[in-house]
Structures are given as C-alpha cells and as structure tokens.
Image: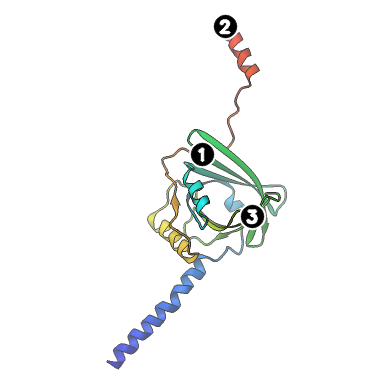
C-alpha cells in the first residue's frame, strides 16, 4: 500500500511540474524573428482578447487579412490590415518597429501597441500577442494567423491552450467561407471620368 501511494504521489508531482512547462513553451516569444518568414499575406483564423467591447467589434468583421512587407530599414516592417464588413473593406496601414523578440506599432500618440510573435508548431501559422494600452482600453490580445483560411483541429487546440495560459476567453473563429478583401482598394472612377466614358459610348 505504501508503495502504491508513493508511486501515485510521484505521478501527481510529475503532472503538477510538467503543466507549467507547457505554458512556458506556449507563451514564449520567438527569440529570433526573421522578417522574411512573415512577409506576405495572412488570414486571421481566430482571435481572443480580454476587452469585451473589442471582442464584439471582432465578431462584426466577416474576414481580416494581414500583410507584412519589408521596408528599406532592416528593423521596420510595413503592416496592412484589411477588415471586411459585408461589402465594405477597411484598409489600415502601420509601420512596425522590431525590437529583439518584440515589436511596436507606430500609431502616433493615440495609444500604445506592443506585441510579439509566440511559439506555434503549425508550419504555416503565426501567433501574435498584442498588449494594447489607451485611455479607453487595456487589454491582452492573441491572434492566430495562417496562410490557410482554416487550420487543423490539433493546431486550433494548441492555440486554445495558449489562450488558457493567458486566461483569455474562448476565441472568435472567423468563417472561412467569407470572402477576403483585395490587397489594394479598388479604384472607383471619378464622376468626371464616368461622364466622359458615358459620352464616348453614346
């Protein structure tokens, strides 16, 4: 009986010690961020944050596309986020300054946005953690990006485990059937050009 209790105790101690190690790995920022790895187009697969109003705002988006491109400065990346609301596309452009394992968004003096890329075993995914601070909002955000519109169940479960490590709520999962916006806004013809085209066709 003593031997059985001793083995059981050792097993429980082993589990209790291994659990924090899982979170330690899942929340660990990438030490070396290679800008070329993040370059190009990414679709937001899922996201979670601890600011209720922002969660509801995320739910209103049909799809979100993110583009990273290298700039002339080695420590700066151009970032474009395109939000689709029904038939409307919203384009947001920012510069990101890389600082070791973290980065910051240049958003003027409106608010502070610091972030980092976290560990993920998904080969064509990226997990971003944002820390947002403003007069109206103080939140931690986690976003799962992928080159695909959907990820495998095990990849989503890994992301959910990361959310639990940060004590964040269940993620908002984007509908992969919703259309993504184009990278560049469509140029609408001016009224004068439209009138000239109509006159030429008459």
Dot 2 alpha-carbon crowd within 10 angstroms: few under 14, some 14 to 19, many 20 or more:
few
Which mark is in front, 2 or 3?
Answer: 3
Q: Mark number for residue 135? A: 3
| Picture coordinates of residue 195, whole percent (x, y) | 62, 14
Q: Nearer the viewer, residue 22 or 57?
A: 57
- Please determine whether, in this image, residue 128 is positioned above or below residue 42: below
* Residue wearing tag 1: 84
* Residue found 61% across the figure and 51% down from its top: 36
Instruction: Name the residue furthest right.
Output: 73
Q: Mark number for residue 72? A: none
- Distance from Cα at disc 2 to Cα at disc 3: 57 Å
Q: Nearer the viewer, residue 15 or 47?
A: 47
Q: Earlier in the sequence, mark 1 or mark 2?
A: 1
Asked whether residue 147 appears in the rendered view, the answer is: no
| Picture coordinates of residue 132, whole percent (x, y) | 60, 56
| Picture coordinates of residue 33, whole percent (x, y) | 61, 59
Q: Earlier in the sequence, mark 2 or mark 3?
A: 3
Quadrant the C terminus occupies: top right
| Picture coordinates of residue 157, whole percent (x, y) | 41, 59
Dot 3 alpha-carbon crowd within 10 angstroms: few under 14, some 14 to 19, many 20 or more:
few
Q: Earlier in the sequence, mark 1 or mark 3?
A: 1
* Residue found 51% across the figure and 58% down from its top: 50
Asked whether residue 184 appears in the rendered view, the answer is: yes
Q: Mark number for residue 202? A: 2
Q: Nearer the viewer, residue 9 or 67?
A: 9
């Amino acid at each position: 009986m003593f031997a059985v209790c001793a083995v059981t105790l050792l097993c429980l101690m082993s589990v209790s010690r291994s659990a924090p190690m899982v979170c330690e790995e899942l929340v660990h920022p990438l030490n070396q961020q290679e800008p070329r790895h993040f370059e190009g187009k990414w679709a937001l697969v899922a996201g979670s944050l601890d600011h209720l109003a922002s969660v509801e705002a995320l739910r209103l988006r049909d799809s979100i596309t993110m583009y990273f491109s290298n700039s002339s400065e080695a420590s700066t990346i151009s970032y474009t986020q395109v939000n689709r609301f029904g038939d409307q596309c919203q384009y947001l452009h920012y510069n990101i300054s890389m600082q070791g394992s973290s980065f910051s968004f240049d958003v003027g003096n409106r608010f502070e946005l610091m972030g980092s890329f976290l560990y993920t075993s998904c080969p064509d995914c990226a997990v971003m953690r944002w820390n947002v601070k403003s007069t109206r909002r103080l939140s931690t955000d986690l976003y799962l990006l992928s080159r695909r519109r959907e990820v495998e169940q095990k990849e989503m479960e890994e992301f959910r485990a990361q959310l639990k490590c940060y004590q964040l709520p269940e993620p908002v999962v984007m509908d992969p059937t919703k259309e993504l916006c184009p990278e560049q806004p469509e140029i609408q013809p001016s009224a004068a050009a439209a009138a000239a085209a109509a006159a030429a066709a008459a």
